[in-house]
Amino acid sequence: MPIKRIYLYLALAVVVVLAGAGLKYFENQKRIASGQVPGAQVKTVKPAIGGAFTLTDHNGNRVKDTSFHGKYTLMFFGYTYCPDVCPTTLTTISEALDLMGDDAKKIQPLFITVDPERDKPEDLKSYLEHFHSSFVGLTGTRPEIDKITKSFRIYAAKAQENKEDPEDYLMDHSAVSYMMRPDGSFETFFSHGMTAESIAIKIKDHL
């Protein structure tokens, strides 16, 4: 057999081997990513949400983030003058907790105001009487509220102001709810518009 043909066959053999090895590598990478390879670990990075805080509850008591450790917390940021999103969300959360039965005892719902200038402890207490009895309202000084909204990546700003009445204004704010673990770390979130049934199911999936 001519030498050139031998070299050609050898070259083709090398190409086939390399191609097969490459295909196997990419197939393995795909299986690892999908969790099909036994022992393969796919790391899920949790977003950096949450942090230490000190605020005042609706009974006038000073509390910290650690005051709620030991339970899962369901946190929503809003304000008592909110005309739509806040009452709708708190009603939905209340209904979800009712649907959960005894599992609701593992959850501590929190309503944190983004409008501390108007939402004093007594205002929060009166407001929360319309929702689930386990709700705790939190307020504080403007710097304290700014700190917690920043650590939880919550947007909040005055949207409409009445120039004739400084106390008459609306707030734009994030409408997401957070579920935090008993140690205070982030677990998952709930977007605005979810049904009570969907929230109850998702919470139970994370307990």
Image: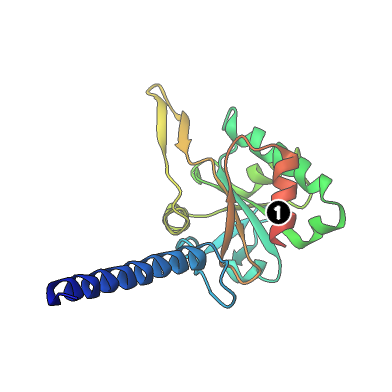
Quadrant in the picture for residue 4: bottom left
With 201 as the anchor, is 79 left or right in this view? left
45 or 166: nearer the viewer:
45
For the image shown, how many numbered marks are present on the structure?
1
Which residue bears the numbered disc 1? 203
x and y, in percent, of residue 151 in the image:
44, 59
x and y, in percent, of residue 199 in the image:
70, 45
x and y, in percent, of residue 43 in the image:
49, 69
161 or 52: nearer the viewer:
52
> What is the residue that sits farthest to the front in this orientation?
1
Q: Residue at x 62, y 72 (%)?
A: 183
* Colour pattern: rainbow
Residue 154, compared with residue 194, is above or below; it is below
Q: Quadrant of the C terminus?
A: bottom right
Q: Please state which amino acid type lies under the numbered disc 1.
A: Ile
x and y, in percent, of residue 93 in the image:
71, 43
Residue 57, compared with residue 8, is above or below; it is above
97 or 67: nearer the viewer:
97
With 165 as the anchor, is 3 left or right in this view? left
Residue 82, compared with residue 123, is above or below; it is above
